[in-house]
Image: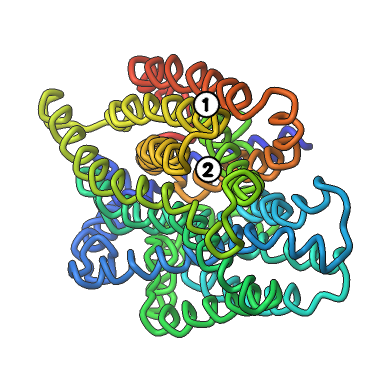
Amino acid sequence: MARASMSSSRSAEKRTQDSDTHEKEGPAQDSQKAATEDDWESDPDNARNWSRRKKWTTVVVVALYTMVPTLGSSMMAPGLPNVASKYNLHSDTLVSLTLSIFLLSFAIGPLFLAPLSEMYGRTWVYHITNIFSIGFNLGCAFSPNVNTLIGFRFLFGFTGAAPLAIGGGSIGDMFAPHERASAMAIYTLGPLMGPVIGPVAGGYITQAAGIKWVFIAIACTCSLASVIGIPLLRETYAPVIRRRKAKRNGDSEKALEAIDPLQSVGVWEYIWINMSRPVVLLCKSFICFILSLYMGFLYGVYYLMFATFSSLFIDVYGFGTGAGGLAYLGLGVGFLIATLASARFADQTYQYLARKNGGKGTPEMRMPVLFVGSLFVPIGLFWYGWSAQAKLHWIMPIIGTGLFAVGLNAIYLPISLYLVDAFKYAASALGAAAVLRSILGFAFPLFGNQMFDALGMGGGNSLLGGLAIVLGIPFPVWIYYKGESLRAKSDFTR
């Protein structure tokens, strides 16, 4: 019975329309379906046909929603000594856990929230999870003990995962592949800049008013995002828009099924197909797994820096709590430089390779930008680690983190674009990637201090740089040459 259920699930998956790209399916077998598809291609409700202003307003709102939880993920980092003092903590691991527990639930959330966005629409997932995040941060602010603080941080991570899990899907809904890189670059700037801006503000807030006001500030930022997002954000996911429109117009069940074949399966099978999809993608698609693992490794290193910056720049370089947050600006500058450069380079490279391929673009044409980014990551880690080990002027390790940030952004963008381009269900593919990314982001800070105590800043970062070379050089080259043939064998890819 289990095999039969899985077989019917795969069959239903295979029947489902390729809605994330809105590409035409070829010769239609059913005249009603063909007419429906032709009407949809020119329908003003189709997110691909929105005005440029409406599309970019949506991109900015989604980027804002995405930046808020990532800002909240690290805003307390400069205040970790204050957390230890407030709750009388003597374990470095427990103190780090108050920061990184967010990322554990950040890994779990996409498994539920990404499929929900493909079942009921993306917009309500953004709005509802953000409202819950307001309450959870107020809970953190007034936590009477460390266990309560960890609990509310965990819940905030779960709801905060929504925009990161489904934001790339929203971009894919609105933009064709050849114009997608610039929009994706703006969107990815939110989750990358949030963890940088957070500590800068958090350091001064903690110094002036205490750690409680850091969480109140996050709750206020979530509230601002809702005030902006609720009136401006509109649904982008094609099957949901079409299903709602068909029901409003009183269309027959046959018309509904032509729009979304999964409507013909039972309720529980429908839920199972959608909820299991991110896990199935992660376990059954080697491409999805290896790209997610690489991105997760870099994300772990990124959050490891947050956990160790305080001890380095406060204890070694003598920064105060407020000024300690400024050490994160090297990452921010690197992200901004990479965003301006990689977005343009990604679109130009894709269009150039597509022209050489007879005008047909493929997801593998995203890989050249990743090759460039994979060179900056180990250089940045070696620079950061050994300049800190030698206790050179404080600007030297900050420059190293900036180089690492350039590489991280130049890798994050093409991986996100590849997953959106290659997989039929973009939100589920990005949600699957977010699982590994957040698990490793949670785990790395827990052993970081022990690793650096044993190997030193130079040795520890050299180890990480070596692993970045092993993961970042061979696999992207292999995907560039073999990815298309692998995708042809999968039911989940385009």
Q: Amino acid at mark 2?
A: Glu
Residue drawn at point x = 43 percent, y = 34 percent: 493
Location of residue 182 in the rendering, given as x and y in whole percent from the top left corner: 25, 51
Q: Which mark is residue 290?
A: none
Q: Quadrant of the N terminus?
A: top right
Given contact means CB atoms under 8 Å apart, are the residues at marks 1 and 2 in contact? no
Q: Quadrant of the C terminus?
A: top left
Taking 8 as reference, is 182 above or below it?
below
Mark 1 lies on residue: 386
The residue lying toward the viewer, choosing from 54 and 475, is 475
The residue lying toward the viewer, choosing from 473 and 39, is 473
Other residues around mark 2 within 10 Å, as few (<14) / some (14–19) / many (≥20)? many
Taking 265 as reference, is 448 above or below it?
above
Mark 2 lies on residue: 13
Residue drawn at point x = 35 percent, y = 37 percent: 410
Q: Amino acid at mark 1?
A: Trp
**Viewed as shown, does residue 38 lie left or right of 14?**
left
Location of residue 220 in the rendering, given as x and y in whole percent from the top left corner: 56, 81
Q: From where the camera sits, is residue 372 visible?
A: yes
Q: Earlier in the sequence, mark 1 or mark 2?
A: 2
Other residues around mark 1 within 10 Å, as few (<14) / some (14–19) / many (≥20)? many
Instruction: Tell which tag, 1 or 2, sits nearer the viewer.
Output: 1
SS for dot 2? helix
Residue drawn at point x = 42 percent, y = 43 percent: 395
Location of residue 37 in the rendering, given as x and y in whole percent from the top left corner: 27, 56
Q: From where the camera sits, is residue 435 visible?
A: no
**Viewed as shown, does residue 472 lie left or right of 138?**
left
